[in-house]
Image (spheres, rainbow, N blue to C red):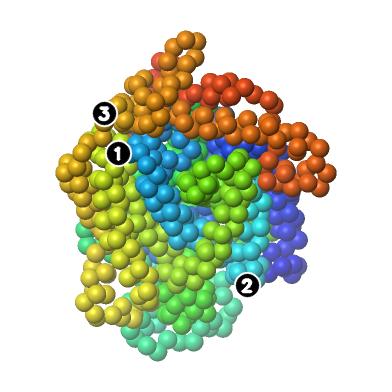
Amino acid sequence: MGHLVGQLDAADIGVICAYFVGIMGVGIWASCWNRGSVGGYFLAGRSMNWVLVGASLFASNIGSGHFIGLAGSGAASGIAIGVFEISAILTLVILGWVFVPVYTISGVYTMPEYLKRRFGGTGLQFYLAFMALFLYVFTKISADLYAGAIFIDQAVKINLYLAIIILLVISGLFTILGGLTAVIWTDFIQTILMMCGAFYLMVVAFIRVGGFDSMVQKYFEAVPNTTLLLRGEGVFWNSTYPPENPYPPPVDRKYRECGIPASNAMHMFRSVDDQELPWTGVIFGMTISNVWYWCTDQVIVQRTLSAKNLTHAKLGCLLAGLLKLLPLWLLIFPGMISRILYKDEVGCGDPDICQRVCGKTSSCTDIAYPRLVLRLLPMGAKGLMLAVMIASLVSSLTSIFNSSSTLFTMDIWRRIRPKARSAELMIVGRISTLVLIGVSIAWIPVVQSSSALFHYIQSVTSYLAPPVCATFLMALFWSRFNRPGAYGALMSGLVIGLIRFIWESILPQAACGTSQGNSTAEMLISSVHYLHFSVILFAISAIVGWAVSISTKPPPPENVEGLTFWSRYHNKKQAIWSGETVRSGGDEQPNSHVDHLHAYADMQMDDTASERTIKYKPWYMKIVYWICGIETNPKEDRETVIEELTLSIDERPKMMLLTDICAAVLLAAVCFMWGFFA
């Protein structure tokens, strides 16, 4: 029976259609709640339980970039790339136990808003919002779009940009119509799909290769036939090919060392001069990137802020950490198996052959997972896995779109128009999503030129994120850290990081057997690993921030109480500098978010005031209002809104003990993984 579309059969198409119908139904159902107000749209009404929070954290992180990038890096150089997944577990514990309590009690929507409350003014908030959007465009959105398009292109053989348009339409519908509630519920469903589909493929792949021990042995033998021919070791064409030679014999001997698996492929800790992942960079540089991503990045932190309370936020972090143990088995090992089974394509060593296989001269390891799916799975199962890949992409993109629109709306637009009403903020949030998409598509050719997708993402993060990480850590743990110090840390790090980012972006990615260049500039760039550069940049930013802070006036103690880790339980006035307090039952309550709550209450009252106008609009205008999130709310008294939104980080003693024990067990599992694969 022939394929109906590309490499997909009728059963595959049916599975994909069933997936879309089901997931769209979930999104529409979820969009009926918590979307008619700013707090509901951006923080899901702070009503999510720990299962939804944990699933959303994991699904927001594991997008198509991980399916393509982790499997591709596993095919290229072995299990070392798994350190990013395992080390993230420790950072998730830090997020739940250190950062979330401070963020929660401060009552913020976004991470730039926290800096505003910590230091006063709006400049830092404005700067950090732009920096976050910049990183979203050049790492998250463009990389995920490219990764998803690779899979669709391999499956149905359509134009890369047509595949991207299809993906954007699906992802945009969830984000624009539903807000964070729809995003989190679709994340939950898609996490289940991802785990089931990836587990099934892992089992099939291990059976095909003969088990774990056989995989380890055969991986080191997975040398492409072009390389074997150049080395005079004979040619044994893969059984998946037709009888005739699929590629012409190579003639250029400079490629004789290309396509050979790394000798240390089964080790996570590698020598300090390793070109892929030196152990010094893994220990120090990766920790900096992880703290930025998991503890200060809007996409991730927004999920924890949507939790019912601190206990649910902590348990959500632990669930996400538990799931992070799986990618080594579900993605990296299958990527290595793909190289074993399809060594002449996934592991191609000749740039001309790589160009024919995947359209790139540098490497084709990024097609490892799609090749495994399309050639190994039976009819129907291929459709399921394509649905899983699309699910992971949609999950990641919807999370990023929602968080980026939150950043632009709450941190940039509200500064431009301080008196903007709730309806205007909802519309601006949706329009900003469309603008980000356009810029991200324009950057895709740069992403496409990189040799390994996951290393591209991590390298850009290492060039731009360390100053932000340094600023947040010093703000959280050092009360003497002031606004001039924060500006100094961010701006000095930004200048240095941008120089490296631009410098490396304009240099062509050299294929194996070709020269990167002999100029001093190119040698300087290539000699400093991006993880080592991250450590250097973090140190420079922290030193500048420290020097400027001790040289200038310290912030008043009362303005930082409740906004550092050491003062998170203090009930005194915090750094919003408004002079107001909230009273409940005659007792003064912590007012770290008084201005924010009052502004939110005013928006709610504005919505209520316009209720009669919306109620009597024509039916077609009601549809427009529903799409934009401008819905009627039950009439609420202004002070009632404030009282209901007053936040707390108090925990029940038994639940606190339970979460601490679970965290200890999870960290013990991490130590075992480190020791076993080190």
**Mark 1 belongs to which amino acid?**
Ala
State the residue at coordinates (24%, 75%): 521
Circle 3 sits on which residue? 557
**Mark 2 belongs to which amino acid?**
Asn
Residue 580: where, in percent of width, then height? 43, 24
**Mark 3 belongs to which amino acid?**
Pro
State the residue at coordinates (56%, 59%): 435
Earlier along the polypeptide chain: callout 3 or callout 2? 2
Report which quarter residue 6 is drawn in. bottom right
Circle 2 sits on which residue? 159
Distance, label 3 to label 1, CA atoms, is 13 Å
Q: Determine contact: label 3, label 1, CB under 8 Å.
A: no
- The numbered dot on residue 475 is 1
- For the residue pair 496 and 662, the one nearer the viewer reads as 496
Can residue 478 be seen in this snapshot? no
Earlier along the polypeptide chain: callout 2 or callout 1? 2
Residue 243: where, in percent of width, then height? 58, 80
Residue 465: where, in percent of width, then height? 35, 53
Judged left or right of residue 468, residue 382 is: right
Earlier along the polypeptide chain: callout 3 or callout 1? 1
- The numbered dot on residue 667 is none
- For the residue pair 361 and 207, the one nearer the viewer reads as 361
Residue 307: where, in percent of width, then height? 51, 31
